[in-house]
Image (cartoon, rainbow, N blue to C red):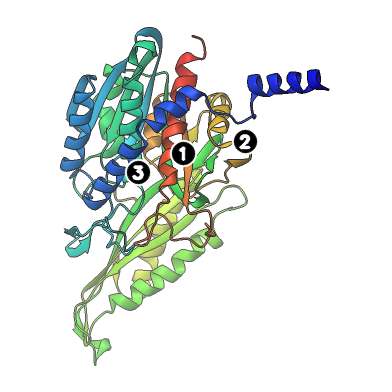
Amino acid sequence: MRQLLLVSALAAALCGPAFAQAPEVEALAASVDAKVQAWRRDIHQHPELGNRETRTAKLVADHLTALGFEDVRTGIATTGVTAVLRGGKPGPRIALRADMDALPVTERTGLPFASKVTTTFRGETTGVMHACGHDAHTGILMGVAEALASVKDELAGEVLFIFQPAEEGPPDGEEGGAEEMLKQGIFDRFKPEAVFGLHVFSTLKAGTVGYRSGPLMAASDRFNIVIKGRQTHGSRPWGGVDPIVAAADVIGTAQTIVSRRQNISKQPVVVSFGAIKGGIRYNIIPDEVELVGTIRTFDEDMRQQVFADLINVSESVAHAHGATAVAQVPDTKGNPVTVNHPALTTRMVPSLEKVVGADDVIEMDLTMGAEDFSFYANEVPGFFFFVGATPPDQDPLKAPSNHSPEFFLDESALKVGTRALLQLTLDYLHEMD
């Protein structure tokens, strides 16, 4: 019996549980956990909108420079930062990406480090908040940079760190985001074999991670529709052309584009109106009403058909009311579908399982949210995954979502994200070492 117990103990010591982390990753991550939390809180308290992330970019660049990284570049795509860590051994080249921008959202979390920042956006005063978790992404990648720098001599390969502005889109009339960083040559100077990224996500509980092979996140396009009528006094609507009523009819009829014109048994489609702006006084029918919104698709033919249908609905319905419509659909170049490279996904999922255990690695449904990480993944094989952000005692389906003024990040997600990116990096670089 004693011999049997000794054999069992030895087997457990050698194998451990199926989800045991490599001690190297745990030790490396633990050494930066406190800093990651501090960086995240600092960035959260000082959010900046897309192409305006000057304070955040300086924090990142100063950190990478202090770590001794090579080729630290700033001002890419306005405020982006990149740097290269070269290991002491030959090996693969990979890229790790984090986004830095916040949203025009007035925070209502009540956190002691809540944002008090305000700005003017589209002509209106609003708060600025990291309501999507990009503060966490930046803090995590700063921590991963420090952890990997501490074992630089043992590292096999090279890592490009990408701190990207304007993932949520640049200001009107400006270029920005992942596409602009690529246009400015970041993959020309350093061509990786693979690119990795993560996103904290409210619909997953903290302590879990989510992924999907192949298409993961939708293509995203914006639209702008201006309904033009003729101003008149509210007491005599027959004296003008009411663009408000016409706009309401456009919005209602546009819902049939998805429900009656698209084969949603093939792929899902979303058409959502996000803002309506028109008029200034209770008894004046205005000259025009502006409608803005988003289109989400997974199929290029369906995407183009939605564009055509929305233009047709806008112009035809407006005409039926005696108004006219100027429909820009889309009004800017959108993001393509985010696709996880199938072979790379198969290769890297075991790394996620090492971090949280196989039971807490969740295969996701298609996600109608969008990500401009898709531009990087169109250049080289990409793997993008979600890190659960909602406290374990909350129902994630009822928790405030990303982009909500009440979006709340359980900070244990920072530890999971740090360990996951480290594990992916080390496993990829050293798999053939």
Give the residue type at disc 2.
Answer: Ala
Badge 2 vs badge 1, beta-carbon distance below 8 Å: no
Q: Nearer the viewer, residue 230 or 427?
A: 427
Residue wearing tag 2: 358
Q: Is residue 426 left or right of residue 122?
A: right
Q: Which tag, 3 or 2, sits closer to the chain's start?
A: 3
- Between circles 1 and 3, the one closer to the viewer is 1
Please name the residue shown 62% across and 35% down the image: 358
Q: Please provide percent x and percent y for residue 121.
A: 20, 59
> Which numbered dot is residue 407?
none
Q: Secondary structure at mark 2?
A: helix
Q: Is residue 300 visible?
A: no
Q: Secondary structure at mark 1?
A: helix
Q: Earlier in the sequence, mark 2 or mark 1?
A: 2
Q: Say whether residue 56 is visible.
A: yes
Identified at 45% across, 16% down, the residue is: 429
Q: Which residue is mark 1?
A: 416
Residue farthest to the top? 90
In the displayed orientation, state which residue is furthest to the bottom. 235
